[in-house]
Image: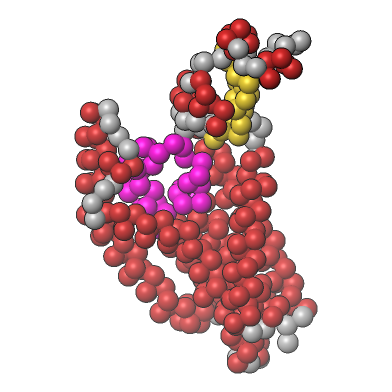
Amino acid sequence: MTRFAWLQFRTRAVLALVALAVVAIVLGVTGPHVHDLYSSCKAQGDCGPTTVLGGPLGPLQMGLDATLLVGPVLIGMFWGAPLVASELEAGTLRLAWAQSVTRGRWLAAKLGVVGLSSMAVAGLFSLMATWWFSPIDATNGGPFPLIPLRGIAPVGYTAFALVLGVTAGALLRRVLPAMASTLVAFIACRLAVTYWLRPHFMGAVRAVLAYGALGGEDTLQGGSSMVRVTGAAGAWVYSGYLTFPRGTQRACAQDLTDACLARAREVLVYQPAGRYWIFQSCETVTFLAIAAVLAGACFWWAEHRLS
């Protein structure tokens, strides 16, 4: 059954490998140039994303980021959703079940071949892109906004999107509705994790400093000066605000005199940049766990509900 599942999938697998080979060549040719630009501007003390990138590499950067962002859900829609739904529409799964192949083995072969291939494609692509982007990322404010686009997180997203597509196909029994449902559910889950779950993977650090240590007025807007002074360059800043000694809050809040500011303290609530890979791992494990739950639901559905 595994061999048959591979024969069904091999055309898409070959196309994915060809695409990865093309990307590897392009990134291998342009990557050293990007790294050299970063080394030069770092030696001069004047590095910025546009300084490192610039020129004709801008469209390549946007294309890579767009692929990393939408690639997992496209795999879920075009590889996952038709995996079961197309066979339900055509009725071909009954032929497989009539050949002494259990429903569990039939689904395990399909999920194993397509799932492992999808995760391998996502992992290799993300690995190449992470290396290529490393000088550019080093010039940005911090790594946390890049969690969905770098490292191991795309592997978790891809596994989740694929199994989500398979689940939608098994439930809806039609390819197009399953693809649409996969898109909507994937976006909803990604937004929920990004805005509700990710900030709570670890408790934030709270730093209290004398007023002015964070760069004055800019700190009220969460400026980058906040994280530089506290030794947490690249931190994920939750909030920054002023506090005053007891008994002076009301007066100082109404009139920020020099006397008030001299006694004020600036409070920074943030996640240190050193926790980036912990957050990466937490997010990847979260989506892999959801994918495992959905896979278990698919096996149960195949055994008890599919016909």
Residue 193 drawn in magenta: no
Give x and y (percent) for residue 97. Answer: 66, 87
- Viewer-nearest residue: 177 or 23: 177
Depicted 65 relative to depicted 80: above or below = above
Front-lying residue, 187 or 86: 187
Q: Is residue 24 left or right of residue 91?
A: left
Residue 131 inside the magenta-drawn segment:
yes
Farthest front residue?
255
Point 60% across, 12% down: residue: 257
Q: Residue sitting at 64 percent across and 35 percent down?
A: 202
Q: Is residue 144 left or right of residue 289?
A: left
User: Based on the displayed image, in which of its 4 quarters is residue 10 positioned?
Assistant: bottom left
In the image, residue 213 above or below residue 110: above
Foreground of the two, 306 or 168: 168
Foreground: 278 or 59? 59
Q: Residue 31 location in percent, x, y?
A: 26, 49
- When the figure is inspected, residue 241 is found, relative to residue 148, above or below; the finding is above
The C terminus: image quadrant: bottom right
Q: Please indicate, yes or no, whether residue 275 appears anywhere in the rendered image.
A: no
Quarter location, residue 165: bottom right
Place of residue 89 in the rendered image (x, y in percent of width and height, measured from the top left):
63, 90
Q: Which residues are magenta?
A: 124-152
